[in-house]
Image: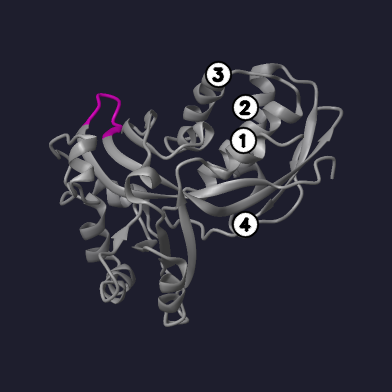
Amino acid sequence: MTDVLSWPAPAKLNLFLHITGRRDDGYHELQTVFQLLDVGDELYFDIVDGGEIARINDIEGVPAEEDLVVRAAKLLQSHAQCPHGVRIRLDKHLPMGGGLGGGSSDAATTLVALNRLWQLQLPVQELLDLAVQLGADVPVFVKGHSAWAEGVGEQLEPIELVEYWGERHYLVITPSCHINTSEIFSLPELTRNCPPITIAGFFRGVGVNVFESVVARHYPAVLEALAWLSAYGKPRMTGTGASVFVNFDDAASAQQVLAKMPNKWRGFIAKGVDVSPLVERSRLPA
C-alpha cells in the first residue's frame, strides 16, 4: 500500500441522548455527549492515478457502493475536483449497528486521511461541511474531540471529560440483535420533548438515553445485557443500540467483568479519550 500506516477510526459512546424537539424537515433536535474511545476500526489507503475509488476487501452485509467510506471518498474527490483515486482497505473491528459510530467514524477518517494524502489542504470547516452530508455523527469524528452536541449532532462544543473525571475505562457489550433505527424513531412512546439541559447539569448527573427504555422493551436481548451489567455499575445504552456499556476506574476491573461475560455477546474494553486517535495519527508523516 502507498500509505503503510493504518488510519484509526475510533468508536464513540453517547453518555446521554435526549430529543428536545423536531424540525420542520423531519429531523430530530438532539442533545448528547460524545465520548470518544481509544479503539475502533482501521483503514489503509493506496493512492492511485486515474480517479478510481475502490474498497478492496469485502465487508459482510455492506456492498462497496453503499459503504460510507466509498461515499466519503467520492464526495471529497468531487468537491475538490481531485484527479487522484484510491484503493481502500477497511479492517472492521467494531460491531456494525451497535450505536458505536463505526460507519460514521470510517467516513470521517476517509475525509481526513484523503485530504492529507491527496494533498488537498482543505480547512477543517470545509471537511465538516462535507461530513454532515454523510451523516449526523460524522462531524464529531472529523473534529476529533469528545464533545457536547446539539442540533442533529453537528453543533459541537469540545468537552474535557478526562480532565473532569479522570481516566475511565468502559466495558462495551453488544448483544446479538440488530436495531432498526428508523423503526425506533417512529415509535409513539419515544420521548421527543426533553427539556434542554446544560453541560453543568450533565456533570451533575442529569441526562438519560431516551432510546434505552424503548429499545429494551422491543429487544429483549438489550434488556438482558443491561440487567447483567447492572451488577457491576450503572449501565447505559449508546445511540439507538444495541451496544451497552458501564465504566470502571481501571482496566483491570473492567477485564475481570469481561471475563465473566456470556459467550453469546461480543465485548471489548476501551479507554475514554478527549482527543481522538485520528488527531494523533494526523500529526505523523503521511
- Residue 1 point in image, percent of width and height: 84, 45
* Circles 1 and 2: CB atoms closer than 8 Å: yes
Circle 2: element type:
helix
> Which region is colored magenta?
22-29
* Callout 4 crowding tier (Cα within 10 Å): few <14, some 14–19, many ≥20: some
Circle 4: element type:
loop
Quarter of the view holding residue 83 = top right
**Separation of residues labelled 2 and 4 (CA atoms):** 22 Å
Q: Nearer the viewer, mark 2 or mark 3?
A: 3
- Residue 110 point in image, percent of width and height: 64, 37
* Residue designated by label 3: 126
Residue type, numbered disc 3: Glu
Q: Nearer the viewer, residue 106 or 34?
A: 34
Disc number placed over residue 92 in the picture, else none = 4
Sooner in the amino-acid sequence: mark 2 or mark 4: 2
**Separation of residues labelled 1 and 2 (CA atoms):** 6 Å
**Separation of residues labelled 1 and 3 (CA atoms):** 16 Å
Residue type, numbered disc 4: Lys
* Circles 1 and 3: CB atoms closer than 8 Å: no
Task: Indicate whether 83 appears above or below 283.
Answer: above
Residue 202 lies in magenta, yes or no?
Answer: no
Colouring rule applied to residues: one colour
* Residue designated by label 1: 71
Residue type, numbered disc 2: Leu
Sooner in the amino-acid sequence: mark 1 or mark 4: 1
Q: Nearer the viewer, mark 1 or mark 4?
A: 4
